[in-house]
Amino acid sequence: MIIRRNNRSVWSRAGSTANYTVLALFSLIALYPLWYVIVSSFSSSRAITAGEVSLWPVEFNIQAYLRLFDDGQLFVAMGNTIVVTLVGTLLNMVLTTLAAYPLSRKRLKGRNLLLMFIIFTMLFTTGVIPNFILVKSLGLMDTYWSLWFPALISTYNMFVMKTFMEGLPEEIEESAAIDGAGDWRILVQIILPLCKPIMAALSLFYAVSWWNSYFNVLLYITKSTQQTLTLKLYQMILQVNQSLLNNGSEGVDQVMLTPEGIKAAAIVIAVTPILIVYPFLQKHFVKGVLIGSVKG
Amino acid sequence: MNDKRSTLRNRFIRDRHLYLMLLPVILFYLVFKYAPMIGEMIAFKDYRLGDGIFGSKWVGFKHFESLFGSIDFWRVLRNTLVLNVYSLVFGFPVPIILALLLNEVRKEWYKRTVQNLLYLPHFISWVVLGGIFIAILSPSTGVVNAVLENVFGIEPIYFMADSRWWPVAYTLSGIWREAGWGTILYLAAMASIDPQLYEAAKIDGASKLRQIWHITLPGIRSTVAILLVLRMGNMLDVGLEQTLILQNQSVLDVADVISTYVYRVGLQNMNYSYTTALGLFQSLVSLILVVGVNRLTRVFGERGLW
């Protein structure tokens, strides 16, 4: 009996050590590609091309960064990305709130009809071409409105906020209404302060998706001075990728247009803001997902 | 009757500010969600820029006929389905396994650190991830091939340029980005399992594995079911940004999916009507899938999605 119990505890300790190790391994796998690109960005072109870079910078230098700074285009693009992200997120939050608050009031006449009107757009999504023709015929091409307008509300996020608002106690609002507060004042002074956690989560979701997206920019922004960080990266990567393929033989990387090191440095610059804010904001993201999973 | 009407009017007047708030919202949905649906009718026309949507000539099902008769259509449809099946079969179980492992970790700080690291890739743009993957898997400069060559003596593999390897790289990159993030809902479901069940099992002498099998897995069953059917509703949707950055000319036979085909042939070569027909086909099949899958959840005794 005693032996068996000892046996079991040895086994469970071994199992738990194995578990911790496996998880550590997975974490390393999750992290390594980022590490690799950081290390590459500080290595010499020669070392990268020779395939010598794996864990630490080889022939450490900051040439790639200096060249990117000199060129300056990437920082113009980053400025554009910041504008697109900030204004886009602000517009998203205003419109999402304007939709979620009235729709969370069960007394609203025609609420179900409106909900069906909105849900249908989630079920039947229109193709890229009709959207493209619409944006073009509205004359939005080459303005950031072509990015912002079609994405003013993420219906999914709107439903997350609506669900959250439905969960707030009704008494607070009722007593405010008795005191003569109108719907706008109730929304701004009472509801929104209670919505801080969900507002934080949703604005982060919106901001990250603005920062990361590139397909919409690819479609609608043709002027090179207006392009965003992700689009610049897309073009750099595509050049490399295509040159590598056109003559799929050994040593093709020598003829590529954007050296690997510069590409790596550009990637590091693009991803740094996310890496900086991520540790502070991570818990809000998780909260947002969990609220979203509770169906209204 | 009169009474009823007047209360209805009173309710509209009372809530006029709420309707005012909804005004821009409704406008948004009408202009940017419903108007493009009208635009879908160019699938039945020969759309020309000069003539506009309404001025172009009707051609009936011409574009659908040439679509279903073309090799390209069956190729992109097959690729779309195949890549989805790979992602589903290999990608779906990974977050569940990760969540099971994480759930057994007793040291809070360790658990939180691992979670933070695993969630991170989800927040990085596909452009960045694509760039990194292409660099790592490069046959001449990539670290993966360097290890394969130096340690195992294997000839360099053209992961991104070889039709046999590309789907593997595609599937793995998807798992790499989303597997950690996918654990959140499972972990939440596991956290809500009654701890007394584990206590009782322990007293009965059940091992860890038996506890996982008999308590944890049944406890997350409904979460698994819902996420699985949701995933199946998206079978015709392939991540456009992911595919576009990872694909290239030499693997188009396996990498070209509906959305990238629409972009390339439709927008770049200006075959608007033809690819709108393809897009409409995709939208309709997706609609049927989502509605059908919602029915299915109800059959399984779960609450539907609406």
Image: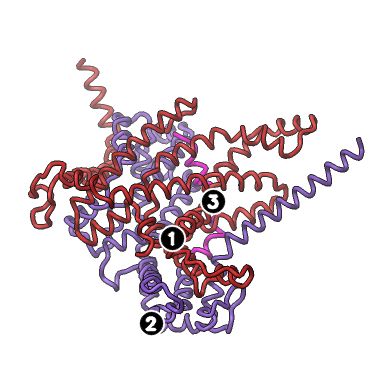
Identify the coloring.
by chain
Q: Which residues are magenta?
A: A271-296
Crowd class of label 3 (few under 14; some 14 to 19; many from 20; radius 10 Å):
many
At horizontal 56% and vertical 74% (from top left) the residue drawn is A39
Which dot marks residue B126?
A: 1
At horizontal 24% and vertical 65% (from top left) the residue drawn is A142
The verdict on residue A277 being magenta is yes
Chain letter for the residue marked with disc 2 in the picture: A
Measured as percent of width and height from the top left, residue B35 is found at 20, 45
Name the image quarter holding residue A1. top right
Which dot marks residue A71?
A: 2
- Residues B155 and B204: in front is B155
Residue A59 shows in this picture = yes
The residue pinned by badge 3 equals B179
Question: Disc 2 residue type?
Answer: Asp
Left or right: A212 in relation to B50: right
Q: Quick one: label 1 or label 3, which is nearer the N terminus? A: 1
